[in-house]
Amino acid sequence: MDFHKRLYVKNYEAWEHFCRQECFSAETLKVREVPQGVILPMKAIPDNPCVDDIYEGGVLDAKGNFVAGSIRISKNNPGYMAVVRGYSVQEEALQHSAEEVIFGGVIIKHFGHFLVECMSRLWYVMQHEGQKKKIVFIDNGWKSDLRMNDFFELLGIDLKRVVFLKQPTRFASITVPDESVHSWGQFYTKEYRQIYQKLREAVPAAPYKKIYLTHSAYKRDITCCNEKYFEDYFTGKGFVVISPEKYSLTEQIALLKGAEEVACMVSTLSHLILLARPHTKLIMLTRTSHDVLVAQCLINEASQADWYIIDASQNYLYGNRSHGVILLGASEYWRKFAKEHYGDDDVQDTLPEAAMDYMQHWCRYYEQNDHLKRLDAQDFVVMFRQMYEVIMGRDCPQGLLQKSPKDEYMEELGHKLGSEQNYNEVLNELAGKPVLVSYEITTDDYKSLLCYSGQVCGTGDSPIRDIRISFTDEKVSCTYKLYLKGQGWTAPRKSGEAAELPGGHVYGLSIDLDSSCKSVYDLSFRLHTREGWSPALSDGMSASQETWPLDAIQIVMKCKANINVNTI
């Protein structure tokens, strides 16, 4: 496949990486029987500040051992919004049921997640239509939704069988089918496709051959400025503009089943291609330029769509693909696509007329609910770069926004490092205080995060693929190595030097200050996986394992007391 004919995006390398991976697995799914098992409602894990929205709950065996929850990436790294462990409940606090039930899985209170990943255990129910066992789900606050009722009924499931568990309950027996998809883990099986095939078979096709799925009438979470440009453009190409949230799930399936071409933003809207027939043409517009919706790459493959992804973002203020305010428009990537696919040579830039509306919506959103306070310094750096590139029409020059981290640090302490101040005196004033070591990680979705001494660097749910270490003082250096599962330690790296991206996730780290620095600085670090933080490690130490990839690191460096810069 020629991805240059599929991907019209700024962030080509990251998109190409995930689109190239084959997600289909021929693995035989298993079914476990858990006699006298317990199903626990979901609870957010309270004791791990590095991880957002990771839950405990799910199925336990009779002895209290964790059996199943939910996985979004892999068994070794369940991922954001996964259910990863059980919790203790006193026997007298348990409800007791003499019924034999099927564990249906986890329902996430978001229609896109529900559609893509929350029904992945129902293949077992479809294969055992004669069974009348109740199907027990746990959820993180889902409220009744008629689309969900349609989903069950179209699969031939009586709604009386569907139970949303609210109290920890011990059942006579629990049947636990394997999940047929890990949406961010590049894994699905033939059973996953069969769920959507059955949905299509239950509904007659609508007559529209070309549909544009718009977000413009949906007023929650995100405002998409200038989407009318694309509504008008595709209307001119014979598309019918549809607001899916105004239709029942049955009607949405009919629309998707009848369509030969679908256009929409990369979002829950593009996930609906799972309801379309194989080989349907899918034109997707990205809301931002910098990130990759990994699950969409799997969906493109599983749905067998004839897909295209176009960077339509013209954000020059902070933009997030899932919330806030974004600006769509005739970007250079859209203009290239329009010329190659529709023969349009004269697509006009829409930025001038859309800019004021975009800024007004952006200001209204970020003046509310402390939204602006949630943006950090790096967000503002990215925002300026976007502004420069959108308005100037060229890449932002390297170094334009880069102030010396050492200068920033000295200013914060009330110092200005100049010819009038002795460097040795400044270092002695900093004895025992943090010194700027910088460390940059690359996460599983190829985002880069840069942190300084003492900061936690990582998302807590996205595995680390690379670590780069450098120092603000050119006299300071170290050697470090990364540990890769099944491959061992990488060759030693020197701080501040470029290195090739290793071929896998990072499972360990070793740092060793150069001998000339050991008498001047103290360095410590710790590593985070889904099991929590490692103990603090000192200069010259290493830590590795092969169970969980690292998802965050923290490095602290301090000057020793009574030092002399001439010793370095």
Image: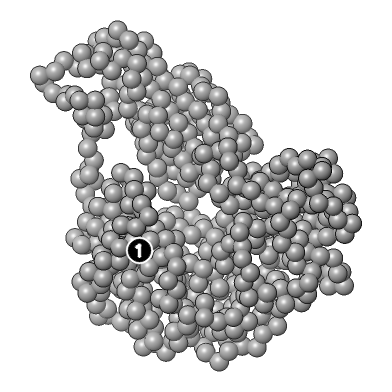
Q: Is residue 154 left or right of residue 5?
A: right
Residue nearest the observer in this picture, 21 or 88: 88
Which residue lies under the disc numbered 1? Answer: 325
Q: Quadrant of the C terminus?
A: top left
On screen, 202 above or below 439? Answer: below
**Three-letter code, disc 1:** Val
Residue nearest the observer in this picture, 445 or 491: 445
Q: Is residue 40 left or right of residue 489?
A: right
| Disc 1 crowd, CA 10 A, few/some/many (<14, 14-19, 20+) | many
Check the image and name the residue furthest to the bottom: 207
Give how far across and how far down residue 455 sits, in percent: 40, 33
Residue at the image position 61 percent from the left and 59 percent from the top? 141
Q: Is residue 12 left or right of residue 474?
A: right
Give how far across and how far down residue 359 sits, in percent: 25, 64
Q: Quadrant of residue 431?
A: top left
- SS for dot 1: strand
Q: Is residue 9 visible?
A: no
Residue at the image position 37 percent from the left and 69 percent from the top? 224
Residue nearest the observer in this picture, 371 or 396: 371
Give how far across and how far down residue 18 sits, in percent: 51, 57
